[in-house]
Amino acid sequence: MQREAQNKLLDELFSPISGTILPASIEERLEIYTKRLELEEKNISYKIIKHKFLNYRQFFLHVKNKQRFFGAYALNYSTLPRKKAQGRIECKIDNVYHFNRDEVKFITLSYFNQIASKSYKTVLELLDNPLSFKEELSLRRTIVDEEYDLTPIIVMEEIPDGRLEIYLDAKVYEDTKEKLIIF
């Protein structure tokens, strides 16, 4: 009830299928407090500090045309203002395909592998075993060269021709997380 009044997301209830540890998640907190117990057992001084940051949770992504749905993966901090965009690929610049609506960008899985130094064979494999959150943010900066970019960046095995519909439900929100400092 308090979270509803403050318009806060119950992000503790979300865990990605892939098992990726997300910022300020229960899994991240468990790691911090497990490390804290280890430090206490070894009598090592530490401090847990809190700081505010911009958090992100993605609920679903669908990319389709009239004939079918496509396997797709959206990088962290990808957002759409109305959760839906319709349009077509307008141009390709430096291996990045630009959609004609909502600043959406597409990259191929091949290009993703190249800049991430990975060898995923399918988008499904990427969904099952994604990069770490920090690695993905670094990859995002490589693609858009901006620190605070919220442009949807969607990875697909191949970029389809014609009209596409994108459904992306994601939330960016102010949050607080803990950090363990060892003295």
Image: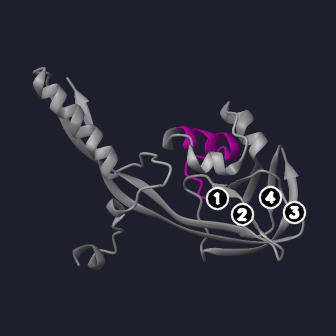
Residue 152: say if magenta. yes
Q: Label 1, label 3: how many angstroms apart (C-alpha)?
A: 16 Å
The image position of residue 118, as x and y in percent, is: 67, 33
The 10 Å Cα crowd at callout 1, few under 14, some 14 to 19, many 20 or more, is: some
Q: Label 4, label 3: how many angstroms apart (C-alpha)?
A: 6 Å
Q: Label 1, label 4: how many angstroms apart (C-alpha)?
A: 11 Å
4 and 3 marks in contact (CB < 8 Å): yes
The 10 Å Cα crowd at callout 2, few under 14, some 14 to 19, many 20 or more, is: few
Q: Secondary structure at mark 3?
A: strand
The magenta segment is 135-153
Q: Earlier in the sequence, mark 1 or mark 3?
A: 3
2 and 3 marks in contact (CB < 8 Å): no
Placement of 157 over or under 60, stated as above or below: above
Q: Earlier in the sequence, mark 2 or mark 4?
A: 4
Q: Which residue is mark 4?
A: 98
To which quarter of the image does residue 5 belong? bottom left
Q: Label 2, label 3: how many angstroms apart (C-alpha)?
A: 11 Å
Q: Secondary structure at mark 4?
A: strand
Q: Which residue is mark 1?
A: 151
Q: Nearer the viewer, residue 175 or 132?
A: 132
Q: Secondary structure at mark 2?
A: loop
Q: Secondary structure at mark 1?
A: loop
Q: Judge left or right: residue 105 versus residue 32.
A: right
The image position of residue 37, as x and y in percent, is: 16, 32
Placement of 145 over or under 82, stated as above or below: above
Q: Earlier in the sequence, mark 1 or mark 4?
A: 4
Q: Which residue is mark 3?
A: 90
Q: Which residue is mark 2?
A: 103
Could you tell me which quadrant the N terminus lies in?
bottom left
Which residue is at 75% across, 55% downward? 106
The image position of residue 3, as x and y in percent, is: 27, 73
User: Of the residues shown, which amino acid type is indicated by label 4?
Assistant: His
